[in-house]
């Protein structure tokens, strides 16, 4: 798109108003207000159609790991498009997909060597559930089809992925959904007292308790009916819940005990978001399946993947068995070429090391906000943080629905944006602000984030 000075701003804004249907958006809020129009990105910043600059505190949507405006990624796309723009992976292969699959398999934990490409994260989750169902059917355990996932967890919008999602408000308009999805408590230790009904649990005790809820759910449903447990390394919805110590070790034991697949949904947590290539590596567990997408290309072209262990591929190796599933644009040659260039860039600039070195600085900078009466908890991992907002810090009292509506949509979302910070103010659980900047950020950007949050949250508290 042209720069704003060469663009008819009015006609572009009218086109958006008249013809564009935005995702997860209340269009009524733009009836009398201008729709934000982002036209350009550079490094950790984006610019709107009027030339105003914003710090990209969400890396687009947990995506732009390497930052905006990386010419080498654009050039990789152009070069591949000229050589071969498209060919499907339906019974045929192409070099970039093969190279990328090998590159990913070399970096995954354990023997997760089989890469099934999709165009995004929701499709990867859908793929994982379908594979789990078929795997158990063709290996003689046909009743195993159910999935266990956590409360408030978001796993995508396709009908299967949406069924696994644990946010009732996102689901009710699309019911009936795919049957067989069961919910267990999440790992929000800040709210452990009310989740467990047992006051004062240590993180370790809570981690064990939360993992045991998965075991109880498997037993309640019947182990011969449960196919998989879907969990994110750090749960996104609800505001960045890291796993308590020992949680994943116990979860892995439970899945092995009941012959249930452990699916690590790393659509957000893979590709450096936590300082490791894959999220499970941060917390020392090996899943049976990884689902990933977003950061694989730093967003320069869409791609996703389900990466499965050799055991799950085994029944499909010989004979006539087929996984009757696929996507036209899965493993697109241009996207695969961009992903390879992105992984080169990760190595060249040591982005994983950069995140690991700066994680304590980012944490400490955000924890300075704990002196504000509205800030209850700061939690997360790597470059993925949530700040939970409360009415009363001493009692952890949260906001009711009306207060949350006024706080999040009535003030915070627009105030943060107006102050030059693009991030997420969210109330799918208790009200939180989420931050996941590009992985190239450092102390300078952290300080800018903290200063804007301090100013806006102070004003929010005064308005209450």
Image: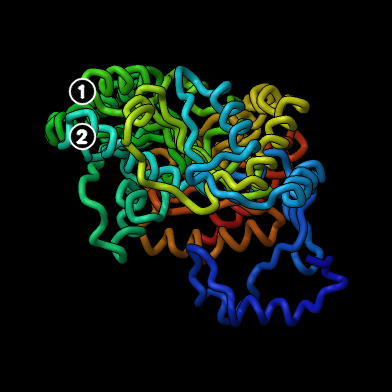
Q: Is residue 223 left or right of residue 191?
A: left
Q: Is residue 151 left or right of residue 295?
A: left
Give residue 349's quadrant in the image.
top right
State whether residue 432 appears in this view: yes
Determine which residue is flagged by label 1.
Answer: 258
First in sequence: mark 2 vs mark 1: 2
Residue at the extreme front of the image, as rendered: 319
Q: Which quadrant would the N terminus be assigned to in this image?
A: bottom right
Task: Between residue 241 and residue 80, name the one nearer to us.
Answer: 80
Q: Is residue 438 left or right of residue 371?
A: right
Q: Indicate the position of residue 280 as horizontal and vertical percent values.
A: 47, 25
Q: Residue at x 17, y 36 (%)?
A: 142
Q: Residue at x 48, y 70 (%)?
A: 26
What is the tally of numbered marks visible in this picture? 2
Q: Which mark is residue 226?
A: 2
Task: Between residue 270 and residue 403, name the one nearer to us.
Answer: 270
Q: Indicate the position of residue 266 as horizontal and vertical percent values.
A: 48, 36
Dot 1 surroundings within 10 Å: few (below 14), some, or many (20 or more)? some
Q: Identify whether 376 is placed above or below 109.
A: below
Q: Secondary structure at mark 2?
A: strand
Q: Secondary structure at mark 1?
A: loop
Dot 2 surroundings within 10 Å: few (below 14), some, or many (20 or more)? many
Q: Identify whether 443 is placed above or below 421.
A: above
Q: Residue at x 33, y 30 (%)?
A: 319
Q: Residue at x 27, y 19 (%)?
A: 256
State whether residue 390 appears in this view: no
Task: Between residue 413 and residue 61, name the one nearer to us.
Answer: 61
């Amino acid at each position: 798109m042209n720069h704003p000075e060469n663009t008819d701003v009015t006609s572009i804004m009218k086109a958006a108003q008249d013809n564009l249907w935005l995702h997860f958006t209340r269009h009524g809020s733009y009836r009398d207000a201008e729709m934000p129009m982002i036209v350009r990105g550079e490094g950790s910043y984006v610019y709107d159609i009027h030339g105003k600059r914003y710090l990209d505190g969400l890396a687009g949507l947990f995506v732009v790991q390497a930052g905006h405006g990386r010419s080498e990624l654009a050039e990789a796309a152009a070069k591949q498009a000229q050589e071969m723009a498209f060919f499907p992976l339906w019974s045929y292969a192409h070099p970039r997909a093969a190279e990328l699959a090998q590159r990913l398999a070399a970096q995954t934990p354990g023997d997760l060597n089989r890469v099934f490409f999709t165009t995004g994260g929701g499709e990867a989750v859908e793929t994982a559930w379908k594979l789990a169902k078929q795997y158990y059917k063709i290996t003689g355990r046909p009743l195993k089809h159910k999935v266990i996932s956590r409360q408030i967890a978001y796993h995508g919008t396709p009908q299967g992925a949406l069924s696994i999602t644990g946010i009732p408000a996102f689901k009710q308009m699309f019911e009936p959904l795919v049957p067989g999805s069961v919910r267990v408590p999440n790992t929000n230790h800040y709210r452990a007292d009310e989740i467990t009904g047992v006051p004062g649990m240590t993180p370790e005790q809570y981690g064990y308790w939360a993992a045991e809820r998965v075991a109880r759910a498997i037993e309640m449903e019947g182990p011969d009916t449960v196919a998989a447990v879907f969990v994110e390394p750090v749960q996104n919805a609800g505001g960045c819940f890291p796993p308590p110590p020992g949680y994943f070790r116990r979860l892995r034991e439970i899945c092995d005990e009941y012959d249930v697949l452990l699916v690590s949904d790393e659509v957000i947590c893979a590709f450096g978001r936590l300082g490791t290539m894959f999220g499970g590596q941060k917390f020392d567990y090996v899943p049976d399946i990884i689902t990933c997408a977003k950061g694989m290309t730093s967003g320069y072209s869409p791609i996703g993947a389900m990466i499965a262990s050799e055991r799950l591929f085994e029944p499909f190796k010989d004979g006539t068995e087929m996984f009757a599933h696929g996507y036209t644009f899965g493993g697109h040659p241009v996207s695969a070429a961009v992903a390879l260039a992105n992984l080169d860039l990760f190595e060249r600039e040591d982005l994983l090391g950069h995140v690991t070195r700066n994680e304590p600085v980012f944490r400490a900078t955000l924890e300075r906000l704990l002196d504000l009466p509205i800030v209850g908890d700061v939690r997360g991992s790597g470059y993925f943080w949530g700040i939970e907002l409360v009415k009363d810090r001493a009692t952890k009292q949260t906001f009711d629905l009306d207060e949350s509506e006024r706080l999040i949509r009535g003030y915070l979302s627009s105030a943060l944006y107006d102050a030059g910070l693009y991030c997420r103010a969210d109330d799918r659980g208790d009200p939180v602000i989420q931050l996941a900047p590009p992985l190239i950020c450092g102390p300078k950007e952290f300080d800018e984030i903290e200063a804007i949050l301090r100013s806006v949250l102070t004003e929010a508290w005064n308005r209450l």
